[in-house]
Amino acid sequence: MTSLDDLLDAIAAYIGRPETACLSLPPDAYLSSELHALEVREIFEKSWLCVGRDEYVPEPGDYYTIDVMGEPVAVVRGTDGRVRALNTACRHRLMPVVEGRGNAGRFVCPYHSWSYATDGRLIGAPHMEGSAVFDRAACRLPSYRLEAWRGFLFVNLDDDAAPLRAAMASMDAATANYRIEEQTEVFHYEKPWNGNWKLSAENSMEYYHHIGLHAGTVGVQMPAGGTYFPEIPPVDESFTHERCAMGDEYLAGADHPLNPRGDLAGLTREELDTGYLVYVFPAFTMAMRAGANNWLSFRPSGPERTEVLGGYLMWKDLVEDDPEISAARAALIEKVNAEDERATSELARVMRSRKAARGPLSPFEKTIAQFYKYLARALAPDRAAAARAAE
């Protein structure tokens, strides 16, 4: 196994390399437990992670639970209407007070029946009157930073992190015309994938694999050869993006489940005629068309397992006006996600081969090189700074 020091040297070296002259990561970068631990500490415990959609908790008392890097979290809309992320461990002896999803006016611990309001306050603790150390006010469920962006909910485990709006500002401007805030979910996806999170991430930020993996699904309408890169890169290096032009036969108006429909006002010709792939560091991706959005969020669960959360969104009025197209698109995206899962698991399976080696990235995979440079800045800032200074 390659040492952590050597892996960090290899990652930092991307900073000084042209994007069209990059190799893939060393195979051990997808296997190393030491690198995984560093990624958790320096990336995932400090970043805004997408944990779902505001529409998952539409009514007061609605909740769902999710594991966020080992933290047991309940996302709940309180009786005051505010959405919060609460730690689910009872302040008595840490039994989870809620699991799954549902609606509740309060959370009651199944162990000793301590109960909590939907804002985390302790409201009942049977037979604690004789305790000399019991402080009702101090026994409330702790909360995590939770902020919303265009219908998505993000949690940050770092209480001192900059606000979400700062992390999303550049990408927010780039996607404004897509009216993401007007969309609703027609297909939900939640499943563990067998493989390192970086394999899943890389697969979700390039159209090159349409030529093979998605040849019979989304590659039919958006062939890999249509890949190109916006002239203006993100100035704050907070995300990476690329576009893929539709095939000529679909530009001519041929029928296809993904063709733009609905109110298309405000979209540019480029936005109507291309797919737009955005990957927000560290682990949130959106594959957009006019009025639609196939999104995924990745959370590592060990070096060789990734928890994947996502869904397919469409403009709400289009869903109401054309339920048949909603069903057709959902069925197509279900196939696409299965293909992407296969890519992650198959890549992971061969990474331990003694013949596994780094390969040259295609010019269509510049986004992956930009992702590697992000990893360098996040995991080896001193080495990355030295490499940048040497450019």
Image (cartoon, grey):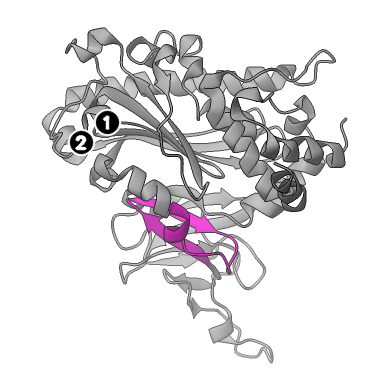
Q: Is residue 222 left or right of residue 164?
A: left
Nearest the viewer among 110 and 233 is 233
Residues marked 1 and 2 touching at CB (< 8 Å): yes
Q: Is residue 41 left or right of residue 218?
A: right
Magenta part of the protein: which range?
A: 144-168
Residue 209 at what x, y percent from top left? Answer: 51, 16
x%, y% of residue 21?
Answer: 65, 24
Residue 281 falls in image quadrant: top right
Q: Which residue is mark 1?
A: 271
Asked whether residue 187 is in view, the answer is no
Instruction: Determine the residue positioned at 49% across, 52% down.
Output: 65
Where, by quadrant of the figure, is residue 140 drawn?
bottom right
Q: Which residue is mark 2?
A: 267
Query: Where is residue 280 drawn, in percent x and y?
Result: 49, 43
Out of 286 and 50, give the one closest to the viewer: 286
Q: The disc labelled 2 sits on which kind of residue?
A: Leu
326 shown above or below 119: above
